[in-house]
Image: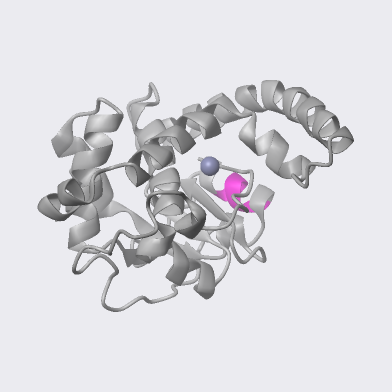
């Protein structure tokens, strides 16, 4: 799961990846912006999730090409069972609002639900150009899956607790980095500096960056 925002620009700026064409069928043919059932603010939306309010499973799914390509990639990257990873990606549903409400290009993940702040953000995360963002959020699904609990709700509570513990490290570390960067003219926001210092964020972001370095032939063959 993720509370902190992902505000960086999408992947078009990543070196070496610019020329890669999207695999055929990458983006879902139809993208429907389904409103979240969980509450429309980050804290109350998370509280809904922790107390067991479920989404209805009617959100926007990944395309079959995304499920196959990213299922194979994520299982390999995270050393996770392939069948379980594929099953998880088939169940992933995107919603607009909920814990990501009112922040257009913010995403938050809870169990199989990924919340995006706006229909434009939803379009972007499912586009090839938004693949780094997508792989980052799906990495949070991988973190959720590995949480040491039997039930889905148990995993949500466990991974949320892990995130909060990580925040205790990330807040002072990120704030110190931000302050240091300020003296050197860095434009990074405090919020981004804290986000980037979080161990769970760093972990999933490393795998997202790794996806960008995949040879194009691999990606195309998997699709
Ligand atoms: Zn994140």
Q: Is residue 39 visible?
A: no
- Residue found 36% across the figure and 37% down from its top: 210
Residue 75 at x, y = what percent?
Answer: 23, 34
Q: Residue furthest right?
A: 183
Q: Residue furthest left?
A: 221
State whether residue 136 is above or below residue 60.
above
| Between 191 and 182, the one nearer to me in the picture | 182
Q: Is residue 165 left or right of residue 84?
A: right
Asked whether 188 falls inside the magenta stretch, the response is: no
Give the dominant element type of the magenta stretch: helix, strand or loop.
helix
Where is the C terminus found, in terms of image quarters?
A: bottom left
- Residue found 22% across the figure and 51% down from its top: 216
Residue 46 at x, y = what percent?
Answer: 59, 46
Residues drawn in magenta: 44-48
Quadrant in the picture for residue 72: top left
State whether residue 193 is above or below residue 129.
above
Q: Is residue 1 visible?
A: yes
Residue 182 at x, y = what percent?
Answer: 86, 37
Quadrant in the picture for residue 142: top left
State whether residue 76 is above or below residue 28.
above
């Amino acid at each position: 799961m993720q509370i902190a925002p992902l505000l960086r620009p999408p992947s078009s700026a990543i070196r070496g990846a610019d020329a890669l064409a999207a695999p055929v069928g990458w983006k879902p043919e139809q993208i429907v912006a389904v409103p979240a059932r969980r509450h429309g603010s980050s804290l109350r939306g998370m509280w809904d999730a922790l107390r067991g309010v479920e989404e209805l499973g009617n959100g926007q799914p990944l395309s079959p090409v995304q499920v196959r390509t990213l299922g194979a990639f994520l299982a390999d990257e995270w050393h996770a069972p392939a069948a379980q990873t594929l099953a998880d990606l088939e169940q992933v549903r995107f919603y607009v609002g909920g814990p990501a409400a009112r922040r257009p290009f913010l995403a938050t993940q809870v169990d199989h639900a990924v919340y995006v702040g706006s229909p434009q953000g939803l379009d972007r995360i499912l586009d090839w150009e938004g693949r780094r963002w997508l792989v980052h959020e799906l990495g949070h699904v991988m973190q959720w899956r590995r949480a040491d609990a039997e039930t889905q709700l148990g995993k949500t509570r466990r991974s949320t607790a892990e995130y909060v513990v990580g925040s205790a490290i990330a807040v002072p570390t990120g704030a110190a980095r931000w302050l240091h960067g300020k003296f050197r003219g860095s434009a990074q926001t405090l919020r981004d500096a804290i986000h980037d210092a979080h161990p769970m964020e760093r972990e999933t972001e490393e795998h997202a960056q790794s996806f960008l370095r995949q040879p194009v032939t691999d990606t195309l063959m998997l699709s």
